[in-house]
Image (spheres, rainbow, N blue to C red):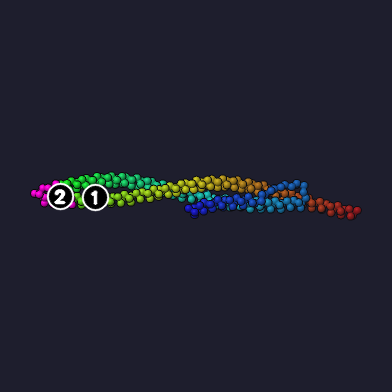
Amino acid sequence: MNHMNHMNQMPQMNHMNQMNHMNQMAPVHYSMRSNTLGGPNKKDYIEELTKQMDVCQKRNQFLEAEGVAMEKERNQIRYEMRGLLVNNEDLLRTNTQLTNEMKRMREQMIEMEREHQSLGERFREMEIEVKQARDVMVEANTQEYAFNFLQQTLKNKIQDAEENLEKQTQHAQSLSDKLWVTERRLEELEVDKETRDKRTTELNSNLFRMETELAEALLVSTQASVELSLHQKLRVDEQQRVDELEEELLEKEQEHQRLQSLVGRLQGEVSKH
């Protein structure tokens, strides 16, 4: 259970660390300067844009790595959810088997109770028979001519009745022992069923929590994908702007060289005059 909780907490910790890292990254700000600036300022601006593009590229790489990590976490969550569903089905089957076994044992206990009552009635009947035999024996004692015959007959009948009574008593004791064992087994099954029901409840709770985490992970992944798309578009726009500024800078440098050449020519003409 602790191992499962630890595995459940790992995606949350990784997700929190990644979100903190994303929040701590310095936001990228973009500024536009006037097209009337001189050549050196445009060079600085191009260098600044290049640095910002590097930052955007690193951020895009981080977001791509973030997407891969989150995909791995989603696969892990799906795998654990499948395991939980299989365990839940096993517990449901086991609970059904335990319920059927408890029902069968209750029926056996009812049957054993009936047999025990039947033995009690038989025991009382045998006690009556023994009493009657003893009464007959007492009566026979008053009759001398039949004393020996009746005495032997009654002794045999009493002995048979006592032997049957002993057997029935042993059988009743055996049934009582079986009944006690069955009751203990039933108590154990009830405890086991309560434990499994509790375990089923915990698994259902974990399954619901992991489904919630998966939904949150999918939402974060979608947000990261949107942000990555925006950064890629911004990167393309900035690259186009850099290309335009480089062309303007090249034109300004050519114009500057032309003006320098013109100034040199004019200075030469002034020197001649």
How many residues crowd mark 1 within 10 Å: few (<14), some (14–19), many (20+)? some
Mark positioned earlier in the residue sequence (2 or 1): 2
Q: Residue 200 in the image: x percent, y percent?
A: 44, 47
In this view, the residue farthest toward the right is 273
How far from the left and from the top, in percent, is residue 111?
Answer: 29, 45
Taking the image as drawn, is residue 74 in sight? yes
Q: Position of residue 49 (x, y in %)?
A: 70, 51
Question: Crowding at label 2, few (<14), some or many (≥20) Cα neighbours within 10 Å?
Answer: some
Q: Residue 225 or 41: which is nearer the viewer?
A: 225
Q: Residue at x 60, y 50 (%)?
A: 19
Task: Determine which of the numbered discs, if any, sits on residue 168 in the image.
Answer: 1
Give me the disc on residue 179.
Answer: none
Quick check: 141 left or right of 270? left
Quick one: 15 or 50, which is closer to the camera? 15
Amino acid found under the numbered disc labelled 1: Gln
What's drawn in magenta, residue-wise? Answer: 138-159
In magenta stretch: residue 213: no
The answer to whether 46 appears left or right of 120 in the picture is right
Q: Residue at x 17, y 48 (%)?
A: 134
Q: Disc 1 on helix, strand or loop?
A: helix
Instruction: Measure the C-alpha gap from mark 2 to mark 1.
Output: 20 Å
Query: What residue is disc 2 on?
Result: 154
Magenta stretch, main secondary structure, is helix
Please give the name of the residue rendered at 51% of the width and 50% of the height, measured from the top-left corner: 77
- Percent x, y for residue 263? 84, 52
Describe the element under mark 2 as helix, strand or loop.
Answer: helix
